[in-house]
Image (spheres, helix red, strand yellow):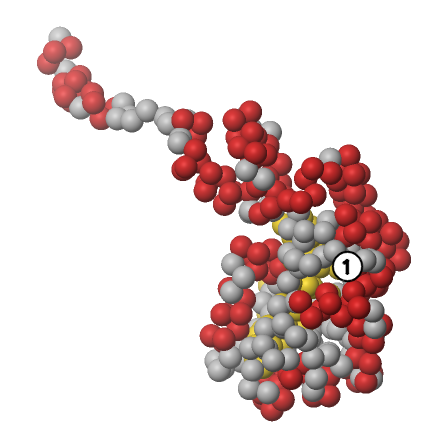
Amino acid sequence: MSDTNPDHLVRSKCKHLLHPSYRPFPFSNLPVELALPILIYATGCSQSTYRSLLLTNKRISDLIRIEHMLSVVSVILNSPHQMEAFLSYITQHPEVIPDIRALWTISPGSVRRIIPTCVSIINLCTDIRSLACHPEVLIQSICSQPFKHKRCISFTMIEFRVTWHTLMSTDEGAQFFNQLEHLHFIGALDQNLWAQWAAIPKLKNLTRASIAMGSHRTVTPQLFEQVIQSPKLKQVVITTRLHGDEQQMLADATLAIDDRFSVMHRRRRWKETNLWHESLLDQNRFWNQAKQEKYLPPAPRPSVGVRDGEIME
């Protein structure tokens, strides 16, 4: 009876379609030449991905350790607890220190509380290529110690108006800033309190700089008189939260300073840590985007409405 059942006949004829024609291929069976690029890309995504891969299995863990993949991980320390834990780790495992290439030590809250820990970490990690820290931390570490950070070419500072005389007054400080190729300022302060000591100096190897202006509507040309004389400077990007006419006025004012200036609108949920991390994966992405947006119309002001008693943008 089953031989004449239509459903049975269909299942018999299409039996091969009910079973997958492939078998799972374990990652551990991949040749090393294919496995390495995949692992390098994955470890560069985040610290948590790096940690998870170390705990996956012995083969993957061994590949990550042997190939020194920590060098593609951006180490982001944004709390005192993380900084203390990281300092304890590298003190107990000094063999990993040469692989630390990108380090973020900017933490919300009191700067004085974290200075000793940050200084200790930076003084140990001398192979850094990209560093983010508070200027006070920099003064007490790189600018006040025998110069060892000779490979750092990108620096992010959480203050715009800084006492450049203090930073550049030592040979170590001058050498550090003159070897930088990229310089980023976040957390810009009110430029109405401009003073001569806040002018960004001329730097020997600087090619690109960015300044986060927040919602400030004016720019002080005197702040840039020296830095635009840097012999290798190609681009200066001002990021802003302004929209419409206000953004256009700021863009016009910056172009009046130098045609290498441009203004980029900061999108919602813009995070400086994400921008910093992305620049490590693709160092030209931010700068190319700024070039593409340079002559575009300014971002329109978002419409504001109310829905269910909630303000929306």
Q: Quadrant of residue 33?
A: top left
**Badge 1: residue crowd in 10 Å (few <14, some 14–19, many ≥20):** some
Nearer to the camera, 137 or 190 = 137
Tell me the residue at 62%/68% (across/down): 181
Quarter of the picture containing the N terminus is top left
Residue 190 pos. (x, y %)? 78, 79
Nearer to the camera, 68 or 189 = 68
Quarter of the picture containing the C terminus is bottom right
Q: In the image, is 230 to the left or to the right of 292?
A: right
Residue type highlighted by circle 1 = Phe
SS for tag 1? loop
Residue 280 pos. (x, y %)? 57, 56
Q: In the image, is 195 to the left or to the right of 287?
A: right
Q: In the image, is 264 to the left or to the right of 29?
A: right
Camera sees residue 311: no
Residue 75 pos. (x, y %)? 67, 48
Tell me the residue at 67%/53% (across/down): 128
Residue 133 pos. (x, y %)? 75, 59
Q: Is residue 76 above or below residue 221?
A: above
Q: Is residue 130 above or below residue 33?
A: below
Q: Residue at the top extreme? A: 1
Q: Residue at the right extreme? A: 112
Tell me the residue at 15%/10% (across/down): 2
Q: Is residue 192 above or below residue 237?
A: below
Nearer to the camera, 215 or 47 = 47
Tell me the residue at 59%/77% (across/down): 233
